[in-house]
Image (tube, rainbow, N blue to C red):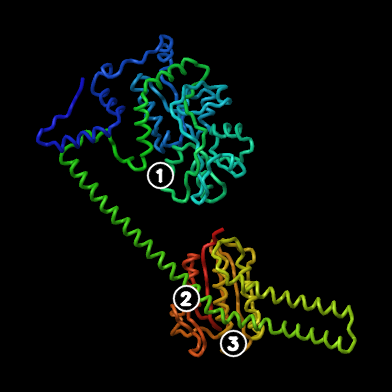
Amino acid sequence: MDAFFSVRNDYPELKSIIDKVMNTIPAYELINSKNIWFDENKIFSKISFLEEEKEYLNKKKKINLCVHSNFLPYEKVSQNGKYEGVTSDIFNLFHINSGIDFNLVKTKDWSESLEFVESRKCDVLTLAMKTPKREKYLDFTTSYIDSPFVVLTKSDEIFVDKIETILNKQIAISKDHATIDFLKAKYPKINIRIVKDIKEGVKLVQKGEVYGYINTLSSIAYYIQKHSLLDVKINGKFDEKATLSIATRNDEPLLQNIMQKLIDSVGETTKDQIYNKWISVVYEKDVDYSLLWKVVGLFLFLALLLLYRVKLLRDNKIKLEKMIKKEIEESRRKDNLIFQQNKMASLGNMIATIAHQWRQPLAQLSMSQNIILRQIQTDTFSKEDLEDIVKDDQKVVQFMSQTINTFQNFYKDDFDEEIFTIASSYEDVKYILSEPIALNKIELIENIDYSIQIEACKNFITQVLLSILQNSVYFLKQRKIESPKIYIKIEKIDKQIIIEIDNNDKGIDEKVIDKIFDYSFSRRDTHQKSTGLGLYIVKLIVEEKFKGKIEAKNTKDGAKFIISFVHNL
C-alpha cells in the first residue's frame, strides 16, 4: 500500500518543501514507521531461517550482546545506559526484520567485552576484527563495515605516505584493539604505546609525548569533529583497512549462520544512510528526522526564517572574530616593537658595562707586554717566565670572551621556549651587572631555590630581572646609600613562583608609585638618558608572556618588587 501527501495545486512551493523534507528521511526509518502502523508482513518478507535455526532461536529467547562502550561513530553506551551508534541502528533493524530480541550486556570497556564473550557471558560481539587469537573462541560473519587505518599527528608534522617512514617513532594504539596484533605481525619493529582509549591517545599526541595515534578513519574523524580540535590532523591514510564483522561464540555455530542472514537482509543503501547519519552527528545530532515529515506549512516557514537569522548572526560573528584577531595581531606587533626598542635603548648602558669589565683585563695584557719587552731589552728573558705570562694572559682573554658571550646571548632575537632554571637567568644578570655592583660596593643577599625550572623564553625572564636590578643599582648609587643592599628571593609556593627583589634605596615617591609601570614614565632625573620603557616592558612580559602579575611597594628601608606567576612544569 502506498501513501502520499496531498497539496493544493496552487501551492507548488509547499509541495517542493515537503518533497525535500521526505528526501532527507532515511529509508530504514520510513520502514520502521510503517511497521509500527501497518501489517509488517506487507512490508518485509520473512527472513528464511532453517528449522534448526528457528528451534535454536525459540530455545535461546534472546541473544546477549557485548559492545565497545566508547567507539563512536560505530557504537557507544551512554552514561544512562543507552546503546547508540551505527551498529545500534543496524541491530535495531535486525530486530525489525526478524523479531529476534537482543539484550545488551553492560561492560566497563572493550577488554571486559572480550573477556565476557570468551567466558560465554555474551553470545555476540557486535563489531570485531578477525584475528588468529580471537578465532580460537569466535566465528565471524562477512565484514559489514570497512574503514582504512590512519595516523593522527600534530598539525605541524609533515605528511606520512607510508607507515614504514614512522616505524622508529612512538605510536599510540588503544588497548586490546586488533590493530596491535595486526601491525606487530606485519611491522615487527613498530614502536607501539598502549593507551586506554582514543581520548588518551589524542592527548598524548597534543602534548608531544607520542608522535601519532592510529585508529580507523571514521573514529578519528568523528573525534576531531566532535571536539573541534585544531592542533592535530589526520596525517596519513594507509593501505591497510579495518574489516569489521559480527563475531559469535563458536560453540554455537548456528548463531553465526543467523547473524550472516541478518547482515544480508540489510541493503548497502540502508547501511550507507545509517553510516552518514552518525558521521554528521556533530552538526545534526539535535535534529530528529523521523519527525520532520510531519512538519508542514507555517511551522516549516518559521523554521526557515530562524535558520536564515542564525546564518546572519554566524556571518556577523565570523566578521567580528576576524576583526578581533587582526587587532590582537596588531597589538602584539606593537608590543614586540616596544620590546625591541627598550633593548636597543639599554644597549648603550650595556656597552658601557662591557667597557668597565674590559678596562682591568686590557691593562693587565698591556702590563704583560711591557714585562716581556723589558726582559728582551735587558736580556733577562726566559722560557719559563714566558709560559707563566702566556698562561695568565689566556685566562684574561677567556674572561673577556665570556663577557662577550653573555651579552650576545642576551641580545639575540631568540623567542624559542626551553626548560631552564630561573636561577640561571639571575646568574646571567648578576654577571652582566657585576662591575657596577662591585664598584658601588653593593651587597647581594640571596635566598634562591636553585631547583625551580620553568618552560619559557629565557630572554624574557632575563629581561625582567635585568631591568629591576639595573634600577636598584642606579638609585643606590644616585642616592649615595651607605651600606647599599639588594635582596633577591626566588621560591615556589604551591603552584605559584614568587620572585621578590627589594633594596634599601629609601623607596619610591608615593606620588608616582602608581605610575612607574606606565608607558614612557621614568623615575630618573631629567638630565639622565632614560626611555621610561624598562618597567613598562617588565609589566608587559609578566602579564602577557607569563600570565602573572607584578606589584611595587615601599618597605621600611626602600622599594620592593614582587612578581608571581603559575609554575608550568
Q: Position of residue 403 (x, y in %)?
A: 67, 75
User: Which element is circle 3 on?
Assistant: helix
In this picture, is 566 found above or below 129?
below
Amino acid at the residue labelled 2? Tyr
Q: Looking at the picture, which amino acid does disc 1 mark? A: Gln
Which residue does the numbered mark 2 point to in the structure image?
536
Distance of mark 2 from mark 1, alpha carbons? Answer: 42 Å
Give me the C-alpha separation between circle 3 and circle 1.
Answer: 62 Å
Give the crowd class for mark 1: few <14, some 14-19, many >=20 residues within 10 Å: some
Q: Position of residue 510 (x, y in %)?
A: 46, 84
Nearer-the-camera pick, 210 or 427: 210
Q: Quadrant of residue 504?
A: bottom right
Find out whether the residues at labels 2 and 1 contact each other: C-beta distance under 8 Å.
no
- Quarter of image, res 59: top left
Q: Is residue 251 visible?
A: yes
Q: Earlier in the sequence, mark 2 or mark 1?
A: 1
N-term-proximal mark, 3 vs 2: 3
Q: Residue, x 19% and y 41% (percent of image)?
A: 300
How many C-alpha atoms fall within 10 Å of the one at disc 2: few (<14), some, or many (≥20)?
Answer: many
Q: Residue furthest top?
A: 51
Q: Residue at horizontal 18%, vertical 27%? A: 4
Q: Amino acid at mark 3?
A: Lys
Q: Nearer the viewer, mark 3 or mark 2?
A: 2
Does residue 293 lie above or below 199 as drawn? Answer: above
Quadrant of res 557: bottom right
Q: Residue at x 44, y 50 (%)?
A: 230
| Residue holding disc 3 | 477
Residue 556, given in percent of the width and then of the height, sits at: 54, 83
The residue where tag 1 is placed is 225
Q: Along the polypeptide, which appears first: circle 3 or circle 1? A: 1
